[in-house]
Image: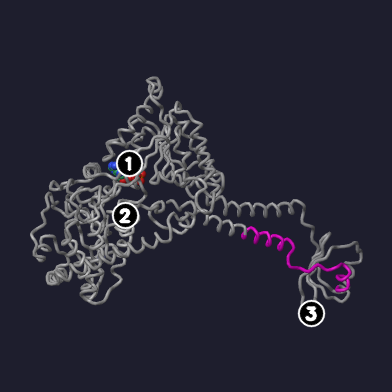
Amino acid sequence: MKNKSSNNRKIVSIGQIAGWLAVFVVLILFFNTSGTKETTLDYSAFKQKVATAEVADLTVAPSIISGMYKNDKGQFVPFKTVRMEDPNLVQELSAAKITYKAEQDRSWIGNILFNVLWIVLLIGLWWFIFIRPQRSDGKSAMNFARSKAKMQDPSKQTVTFKDVAGCEEAKEELEDVIKFLKNPKKFQKLGGKLPKGVLLYGAPGTGKTLLAKAVAGEAGVAFFSASASEFVEMFVGVGAARVRDLFEQAKKNSPAIIFIDELDAVGRRRFAGIGGGHDEREQTLNQLLIELDGFESKQGIILMASTNRPDVLDPALIRPGRFDRHISVPAPDLKGREEILKVHAKKVKLAPEVDLKIVAKGTPGFVGADLANVVNEAAILAARADKEAVTSVDLDEAVERVLAGPQKKSRIISKHEQHVIAAHEVGHTVVARLTNHSDPVHKVTIIPRGQALGYTLQLPLEDKFLTSKSELLDKLCILLAGRAAEEIVFGEITSGASDDLNKTMAYARKMVVELGMSEKLGPIALPNGDDGEVFLGRDLSRHKTYSEELARTIDEEILNLIRTSYARAKDIIISHRVAFDKLVETLLQKEVVEASEIDEILGLKPAVVENQPAIKPAENEHTPKEEPKAPKATRPEAQQAGLFD
Ligand code: ADP
Ligand code: ZN
């Protein structure tokens, strides 16, 4: 979404060019038709042609004579000439046996009409090209300065706090706002500090919009919502006008909540980035600041906004008196997930055997939107199978669907490829099972799903907030085990490990650069861009904060980590080769091998796992436990589950 505004601009500027081209073409046509391709002859030249009878089909009007004349090449082509006082003309024409007819001049009214027609046509064209695209949402033509905000009537407000689960702290903090909206005057009398702007921050899908709606629902006030990206439009000034309009509408309907989604789309720090300012965005932001300063909370309006990037917001926006209440809406924990599942499960019929706690256990890293999705998918699956109620099998499948897309039973894979995939997966499985600091392996499969040709499923025992170095080292080892297995079994490596390799690199880099886990470098953390991603623009604008030498050591340490982990993965596989081969064999036969059988083949006692969920949990195979972080845009990594493609 964040790119939407800039995309719009591009499209629009192309549209504009096309528009002007069209206008240009029409203008040319206009001038061409009003003086068609006829040649203008001097009257004397015309008279000569009459004398030699080289004209024909004349139309004689009071001021113009037009018709055909014979040119130098002997062809008859159209001409016209301005008529002069020439009383003998008709006689001469008759004498030369030239056909002619008389006509009246086009009346002045006709002339005006003719011109007006063209002007109307031009305006029509202009409207069609420039104005019409503005109203793709069905609003009237000149209305684009109006806010596109949607208003929800308080009487139709159905969302309340009951519908939002798993964010009790945020709800508690919002109680004040509700109290205030319910009775602004009383709140003031009691000396409550008036809230004005509330910023909800957290990953996408954690329920920020839902919370804002619920606040309106609880307080019984009107709810205006707009997405900040809608403000940033093609014309400079439109965004500002829309902001103004939004506040006006809200004031008319106060008490009310104005909710702005994706605040960072307009609220980014000004003067950031190479390109310098962005006029439209800046004007919009300024207008927003003006409105924020301009309204008194007494008016019974609360501004709420959501963002997943509070770190990039312009400091002016979050100053006291503006968005000065910051409320975190984090991804839910185990209990929160269960609560959220319960909320959504109310809308479907669950089989009695279903235990939502188990589903919650199997979905670490899922946010509210994902969980809503899980319940929905499960209901669809149950309906498709003509079931009476949603069973745990449906929920189970739904979790995997949300993670990895639908199972693709029909994808045809050759015998050899299947063998390669099986070896690759078993590599992951064996190493995951035989390293001490990794999550228990739950199953391994070579049934393709989504982009993945197969996957190993690991199940974390609990939500974790800290990750140790040993765990990360094991993780690197597991990630590289697929490639290692291919090399050991076939002496040939495939492209199947590319995803693994990317992740390995990311983890190794993080360990060295951010987590201070390299021995050579010690406990250092280096600035690593806004969100861990490197993209050219920002990297150029950022000056290097460390030396070439340090950079080289970093690279060495990363390579070191990866190389040792790869060697370790190979060692583990080679020293368990017999069991490894047997597991590959079994996997090829059965396509799915569950934990107990894996342990049996590896000759291990079943893993000591308490409260192991009865159904299979989230695919959390190659993902780190979330490290506690400042709120960031990235979704919990558990969701980009380890897929082997
Ligand atoms: P955000 O604004 O944080 O991106 P939304 O509020 O748009 O997330 O959430 C999208 C949907 O996900 C909601 O409409 C709701 O169905 C579901 N959802 C998200 N969080 C929760 C929650 N905490 N409790 C219940 N449902 C949730
Ligand atoms: Zn792999």
Q: Quadrant of the C terminus?
A: bottom left
Near-viewer residue (138 or 453): 453
The residue identified by callout 3 is: 74
Residue 467 in the image, given as x and y percentages of width and height: 25, 51
Q: How is the image coloured?
A: one colour
Identity, as a three-letter code, of the amino acid under mark 3: Gly
Is 555 in the magenta? no
Residue 634 in the image, given as x and y percentages of width and height: 35, 51
Give the mark count. 3
The residue identified by callout 2 is: 522
Q: Is residue 34 above or below residue 286?
A: below
Q: Earlier in the sequence, mark 2 or mark 3?
A: 3
Q: Nearer the viewer, mark 2 or mark 3?
A: 2
Local crowd size for mark 3, using a 10 Å CA cut-off: few (<14), some (14–19), many (≥20)? few
Q: Which residues are magenta?
A: 21-49
Q: Nearer the viewer, mark 3 or mark 1?
A: 1
Q: Is mark 1 within 8 Å of ligand 1?
A: yes
Q: Which mark is residue 329?
A: 1
Residue 311 in the image, given as x and y percentages of width and height: 41, 45
Element type at mark 2 = loop
Q: Is residue 426 above or below residue 527?
A: below
Identity, as a three-letter code, of the amino acid under mark 1: Val
Q: Quadrant of residue 423?
A: bottom left
User: Which residue sits at x=33%, y=59%?
Assistant: 509
Res 560 visible: yes
User: Which residue sits at x=54%, y=43%?
Assistant: 283
Q: Earlier in the sequence, mark 2 or mark 1?
A: 1
Q: Is mark 3 within 8 Å of ligand 1?
A: no
Local crowd size for mark 1, using a 10 Å CA cut-off: few (<14), some (14–19), many (≥20)? many
